[in-house]
Amino acid sequence: MKKYIVAVVGATGVVGQEMINVLEQRKFPVKKLVPLASERSLGMTVKYKGENVDVQELKPESFENIDIALFSAGGSISEKFAPEAVQRGAVVIDNTSHFRMDNNVPLVVPEVNADALKEHQGIIANPNCSTAQLVVALKPIHDYATIERVVVSTYQSVSGAGKEAISELENQTRSMLNGQGQPEKNKFPYTIAFNVIPHIDVFLDNGYTKEEMKMIEETQKILDSEIAVTATTVRVPVFIGHSESVNIQTKKKISAKKVRELLKQAPGIEVQDDPASNIYPTPQEASGKDPVYAGRIREDISMKNGIELWCVADNLRKGAALNAVQIAEELIK
Ligand SMILES: NC(=O)c1ccc[n+]([C@@H]2O[C@H](COP(=O)([O-])OP(=O)(O)OC[C@H]3O[C@@H](n4cnc5c(N)ncnc54)[C@H](OP(=O)(O)O)[C@@H]3O)[C@@H](O)[C@H]2O)c1
């Protein structure tokens, strides 16, 4: 079997680390792993297949001989270095928002639109973590009943904002439980410990946040530009795992039973839905796992053709690293 030289850009970050785990766990045919990060990480190593691999400083020349480059070091890094990688013959799978809405860049969730990969010109974008899990849940329903409108509210974990955000929740929680007064805040505008913040990324002129507009536009690009989408994105004091309350209006009537049936057969999603036994997905249970989980599936009593559901996934896996590696797997098929 052919093996590939794979670079991970942002290898010391939460997504980068998870990418390395996923490459190993899924036995991706890696000939050589090249972990790249900033100058700050020189001297550090990452663990891959029981070995310590030296982290290298990201430079344009880092991409000589690289076959596949998985990027997760922020949009400005992708903007500058993804073209350098492509120019040197690598295929880039980018986790940042930089290229997602570019018409020349496919935005892919393999369970939903793997076909779009055929159009790639060297760069493939991975959607926002909240979009990835949403479209996996929507796709089977859309194919059967044509979704007209989606109203989604998210409950997003702090790991979605990177390693410093994880430390911020840890430190604030410790400080508040120890009675040490107002904890420090850097990553979030308010204390995130024991709180809920209805604000992810920057506010735009239309009153939405950029995170909300990403969910709206990316869902339309991946699934169907005709679907009306509105979103409210909220940060909650959970370490890993994003949850979403999803209200779906369809053209054709669909029962809750049929939705359960469709989702049970669909790829990448698992139904956990037995309210009588308190069975529904939660982020703690979904953390470290691959599927998108759906539960609380019911018909919306406020309208004719409406479905309510609750969907949960590990944002570092399906929302980022796993989806990126699945794209790489599709590419080498
Ligand atoms: N977290 C999620 O759930 C998620 C989901 C989808 C997409 N993403 C996207 O993935 C990207 C990374 O997110 P993250 O959560 O992993 O962040 P993170 O934990 O803060 O890690 C950031 C990574 O980027 C590297 N980096 C930063 N500045 C750099 C520079 N100038 N040159 C080279 N490397 C640099 C860091 O290296 P050092 O350690 O050397 O600083 C680190 O490896 C972001 O664009 C984010 O939007 C994240």
Image (cartoon, grey):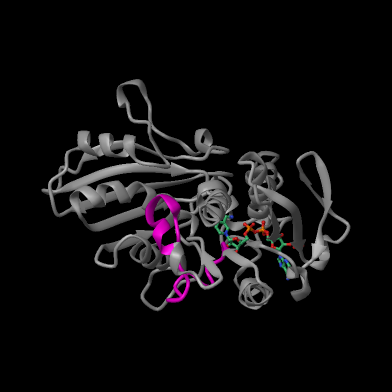
Q: Who's the residue at 74% across and 55% down the image?
A: 12
Of all residues, the one furthest to the front in this rendering is 1
> Looking at the picture, how far across and down is residue 193, in whole percent?
58, 47
Of all residues, the one furthest to the top in this rendering is 277
Q: Who's the residue at 52% across and 66% down the image?
A: 124
- Tell whether 111 sits left or right of 180: left
Q: Nearer the viewer, residue 30 or 273?
A: 30
Q: Would you place residue 12 above or below residue 274 in this image?
A: below
> Looking at the picture, how far across and down is residue 181, in whole percent?
68, 49
Q: Who's the residue at 55% across and 38% down the image?
A: 287
Q: Nearer the viewer, residue 138 or 85?
A: 85
- Tell whether 7 sits left or right of 40: left
> Looking at the picture, how far across and down is residue 90, in whole percent?
65, 68
- Tell whether 143 sits left or right of 47: left
The segment highlighted magenta reads 94-116
Rendered image quadrant of residue 4: bottom right
Q: Is residue 294 visible?
A: yes
Q: Main SS of the magenta segment?
A: loop
> Looking at the picture, how far across and down is residue 206, in whole percent?
36, 75
59 in the magenta segment? no
Q: Who's the residue at 63% across and 77% down the image?
A: 83
Q: Is residue 107 visible?
A: no
Rendered image quadrant of residue 198: bottom left
- Tell whether 291 sits left or right of 24: left
